[in-house]
Image (cartoon, rainbow, N blue to C red):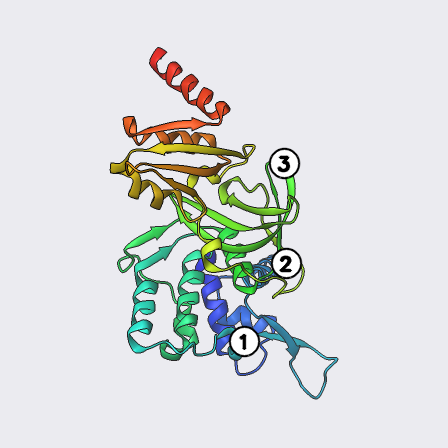
């Protein structure tokens, strides 16, 4: 039995439990564990750790309430797993149900975590807990997003507003995770980087260690939705930040303003052209943005970006 199926069964058993279940009871109900006692204990501990990293409210309680110092068991309290009714209308609940069926997030846990979260948001009209964690059949899914353990851990941290630590570009980072986004085939984490003293965006495939949740849930407040929106590609990098100015012809101005995002400065000229001012930390991505306009845009500065663009074009021409 694959680990995904075992985890799904484990969550279902813990959610449906009317009383705490011992480790041996879970071993029988869930299945998929090794017959060797040592292997079973190791795998069970790993599964427990992963569920908690994802934000599952897995609790340890006495098996016999009259003997608090005796044997203990496990369960997931439904009232702590389910979100309260957010007051969504019937058509809004239907939209969430459709999203849960139309998006397949692949990975070690992924698909069930994402689907379960959508069902949680639609708690008032969702199926019973054991159904909420069921895997969406591949034939139903219209969009497949790659995932993995990093996505699962960060998904829970974002939901719980709990800081995370990880290694990135050779340095240790402590981050308040604001949101996860998926763009151009890659996952990105946006948040406040305490190690750098500013907001940053991290590409998950470049995170060098499995993120670890630290501190307590609810440790920070997210910024307004607009400021937490996915950053444009030229801000998804670790290059030294420079302020770029780009002149765009009138015919391309509207599209350019939209692509530049809310954080860009816009200076409109009488002929309909615009001068955009944007912060750049990924020079390759910004160069691609500029070249996309062909002869409808001119990079005005700074000189370091102009020289970089000219050098790149000359190397391409020589090749």
> What residue is disc 1 on?
80
- Assign a secondary structure to mark 1: helix
Which image quarter: residue 316?
Answer: top left
Position of residue 66 relative to residue 42, above or below, is: below
Callout 2 environment at 10 Å: few (<14), some (14 to 19), or many (20+)?
few
Q: Position of residue 93 (x, y in %)?
A: 33, 73
Are the residues at dot 1 and dot 3 in contact (C-beta closer than 8 Å)?
no
In three-dimensional space, the C-alpha distance between marks 1 and 3, rounded to whole angstroms, equals 37 Å
Q: Position of residue 241 (x, y in %)?
A: 54, 35
Q: Quadrant of the C terminus?
A: top left
> What residue is disc 2 on?
38
Rendered residue at 47%/25% (across/down)? 305
In three-dimensional space, the C-alpha distance between marks 2 and 3, rounded to whole angstroms, equals 36 Å
Position of residue 195 relative to residue 247, above or below, is: below
Position of residue 193 relative to residue 293, above or below, is: below
Q: Nearer the viewer, mark 1 or mark 2?
A: 1
The image's mark for residue 170 is 3
* Viewer-side residue, 37 vs 56: 56
Position of residue 304 relative to residue 40, above or below, is: above
- Assign a secondary structure to mark 2: helix
The image's mark for residue 299 is none
Callout 3 environment at 10 Å: few (<14), some (14 to 19), or many (20+)?
few
Q: Classify residue 193 as left or right of residue 228.
A: right
In three-dimensional space, the C-alpha distance between marks 1 and 2, rounded to whole angstroms, equals 31 Å
């Amino acid at each position: 039995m694959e680990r995904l199926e075992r985890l799904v069964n484990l969550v279902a058993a813990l959610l449906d439990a009317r009383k705490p279940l011992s480790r041996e009871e879970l071993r029988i109900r869930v299945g998929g564990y090794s017959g060797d006692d040592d292997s079973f204990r190791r795998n069970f501990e790993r599964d427990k750790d992963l569920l908690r990293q994802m934000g599952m409210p897995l609790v340890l309680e006495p098996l016999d309430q009259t003997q608090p110092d005796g044997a203990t068991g496990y369960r997931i309290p439904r009232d702590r797993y389910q979100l309260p009714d957010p007051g969504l209308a019937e058509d809004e609940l239907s939209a969430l149900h459709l999203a849960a069926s139309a998006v397949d997030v692949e990975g070690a846990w992924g698909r069930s975590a994402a689907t379960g979260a959508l069902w949680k948001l639609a708690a008032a009209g969702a199926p019973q807990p054991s159904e909420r964690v069921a895997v969406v059949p591949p034939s139903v899914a219209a969009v497949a997003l790659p995932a993995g353990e990093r996505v699962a851990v960060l998904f829970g941290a974002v939901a719980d507003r709990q800081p995370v630590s990880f290694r990135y570009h050779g340095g240790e980072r402590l981050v308040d995770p604001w949101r996860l986004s998926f763009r151009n085939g890659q996952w990105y984490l946006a948040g406040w980087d305490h190690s750098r003293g500013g907001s940053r965006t991290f590409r998950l495939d470049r995170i060098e260690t499995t993120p670890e949740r630290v501190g307590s849930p609810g440790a920070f407040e997210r910024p307004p939705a607009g400021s937490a929106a996915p950053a444009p590609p030229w801000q998804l990098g670790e290059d030294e930040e420079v302020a770029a100015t780009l002149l765009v012809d009138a015919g391309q101005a509207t599209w350019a303003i939209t692509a530049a995002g809310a954080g860009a400065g816009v200076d409109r000229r009488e002929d309909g052209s615009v001068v955009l001012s944007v912060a750049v930390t990924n020079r390759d991505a910004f160069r691609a943005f500029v070249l996309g306009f062909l002869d409808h845009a001119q990079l005005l500065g700074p000189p370091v970006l102009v020289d970089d663009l000219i050098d790149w074009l000359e190397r391409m021409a020589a090749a």
